[in-house]
Amino acid sequence: MMKINEYISDYFENIVYDKTQNEDSFFSLTVNKIYSFESKGELDFGGSEFKKSKLKKINPVKKNEDNKYGWWFLEEGTYKVRLNEKVKKINESITLMVEPHERLRNCGVTHNTEIINNKGPLEVILKVGKNGVNIKENARISTVKVFK
């Protein structure tokens, strides 16, 4: 009998380390890139005047030269995060929901909850509280749960 979390991982590619990301009742997703919003966007009723906010990639910084992975040192604010994992298939009989990882919330940080309905890359909007947060490359920041 297949465990539910192994079933969830079957829907994704570019998994960093499947064995660690499979948890008791969910599958963890990891951070790949973080961007800051650099300009004001514009929204109108019909969309003909819509303008996306410009993004600026934030590069991770290694705490010391010997480290394999770097860190993002984020101040209070709103950021766009691209996750490592990509959706490789969709099954119409189930719903996949992405939500903030418990550890992320325990750092005073959250992101939007999303229902996955498209193949491809996943992005979330990260909201960092007043104390800021340090996030290491490939950190598990989101979880995926399945609903039938």
Image: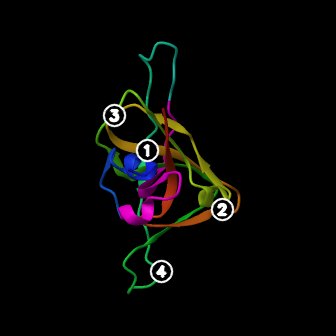
Residue at numbered disc 3: 90
Q: Secondary structure at mark 2?
A: loop
Which of marks 4 and 3 precedes in the sequence?
A: 4
Circle 3 or circle 2, nearest the eye: 3
* Label 1 CA crowd tier, 10 Å (few <14, some 14–19, many 20+): many
Circle 1 or circle 3, nearest the eye: 3
Q: Position of residue 61 (x, y in %)?
A: 44, 72
Which of marks 4 and 1 precedes in the sequence?
A: 4
What whole-number distance in Å separates the C-alpha atoms at marks 2 and 1? 20 Å
What whole-number distance in Å separates the C-alpha atoms at marks 4 and 2? 20 Å
Which of marks 1 and 2 precedes in the sequence?
A: 2
Q: Which residues are magenta?
A: 17-41
* Label 3 CA crowd tier, 10 Å (few <14, some 14–19, many 20+): some
Q: Residue furthest front?
A: 1
What whole-number distance in Å separates the C-alpha atoms at marks 3 and 4? 39 Å
Q: Is residue 84 left or right of residue 43?
A: left
* Label 4 CA crowd tier, 10 Å (few <14, some 14–19, many 20+): few
Residue at numbered disc 1: 123
Identified by mark 2, the residue type is Cys
Residue 107 numbered tag: 2
Which of marks 2 and 3 precedes in the sequence?
A: 3
Identified by mark 3, the residue type is Ile
What whole-number distance in Å separates the C-alpha atoms at marks 3 and 2? 32 Å
Which residue occupies the foreground of this view, 32 or 114?
A: 114
Q: Is residue 14 left or right of residue 65?
A: left
Residue at numbered disc 4: 63
Identified by mark 1, the residue type is Glu
Residue 19 lies in magenta, yes or no?
yes
Q: Residue furthest top?
A: 46
